[in-house]
Amino acid sequence: MDPSFIWSELVPALNKGLIVSLLLIVPSACIGLLLGILVGFSRTFGPPWLSRAASAYATIFRGTPLLVQLFMLYFGLPGIGIYLTPYVAAVAGFSLCSGAYHSEYIRGALLSIKSGQIRAAESLGFSRVKTMVHIILPQAMRRALPGVGNELIYLIKYSSLAYIITCIELTGEGKILAAQTFRYTEVFLIVGCYYLLLVSLASVGLRKLEDMLRVPGFGKG
């Protein structure tokens, strides 16, 4: 381990890649969660045709490797005249894949809520939309939070696949520098530390969010 190499060359390069990784993770996490909520509701409460379409989407994106999805978006779509930049293709791939997994967590949380609550809300004059937004969704999100948080952690780690389609993020910067200097051990050890730090920070934030959303008298504590 050469401290001068780490601080003068490695850390500046990885910090540049870290910014790109965050620019991939944050929008992908937000879009994926929103997509997961919409698909989860469609699978649970939608009409048959919408439920089947949402289930087909979840099956496709949960059943195929993320790397294949990225290749299709970046290398496959130009075959039909659609060209995406590496960044857009990466965000689209991460969002679609993440949304499919989120939809399963949301669907499970929705099914765990007793249907009597919907009938009670309707008897009080709530519309279907207000019932879902103000009564069902808050409970479902609280119950789905552990699974949703787990998917966020997965997203942080599989964002490292973006360099495969030439979107040079944290892992990509490390790979380039390692190939130039042949210091693979030092480079990827520090890259691993970066990801470990990101996952640790996300885990702490998710635990605090669970504590904030916990209802006194229910669940742990």
Image: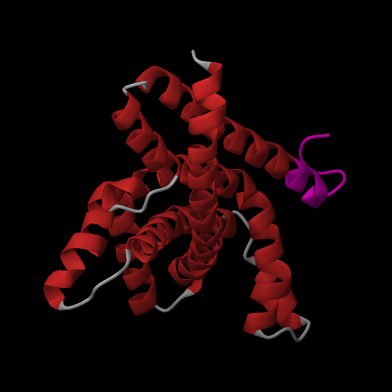
Q: Position of residue 124 (x, y in %)?
A: 78, 82
Q: Position of residue 110 (x, y in %)?
A: 57, 60
- Residue at 63% across, 33% down: 200
In this view, the residue in front, 22 or 15, is 15
Hey, which residue is sitting farthest top in the picture? 1
Residue located 73% across and 83% down the image: 126
Looking at the image, residue 1 lies above or below residue 44:
above
**Left or right of 27, for residue 162:** left
**Residue found 37% across the figure and 21% down from its top:** 183
Residue 192 position, x and y percent, is 48, 28
Of the pair 2 and 144, the residue shown nearer to us: 2
Which of the 4 image quadrants contains residue 99? bottom left
Residue 65 seen anywhere in this rendered image of the structure: no
Q: Which quadrant would the C terminus be assigned to in this image?
A: top right
Above-or-below relation of 110 to 164: below
**Magenta-drawn stretch contains 46:** no
Along the line of sight, the residue nearer the viewer: 149 or 198: 198
The residue drawn where x is 56% and y is 57% is: 26
Above or below, 25 relative to 198: below
Name of the residue lying farthest toward the right = 216
Image side of residue 44 versus residue 77, left or right: right
Q: How many marks?
A: 0
Task: Look at the image and give the residue range highlighted in magenta.
Answer: 208-221
Q: Does residue 16 show up? A: yes
Whole-percent x, y for residue 147 in the image: 56, 45
Closest to the observer: 133 or 201?
201
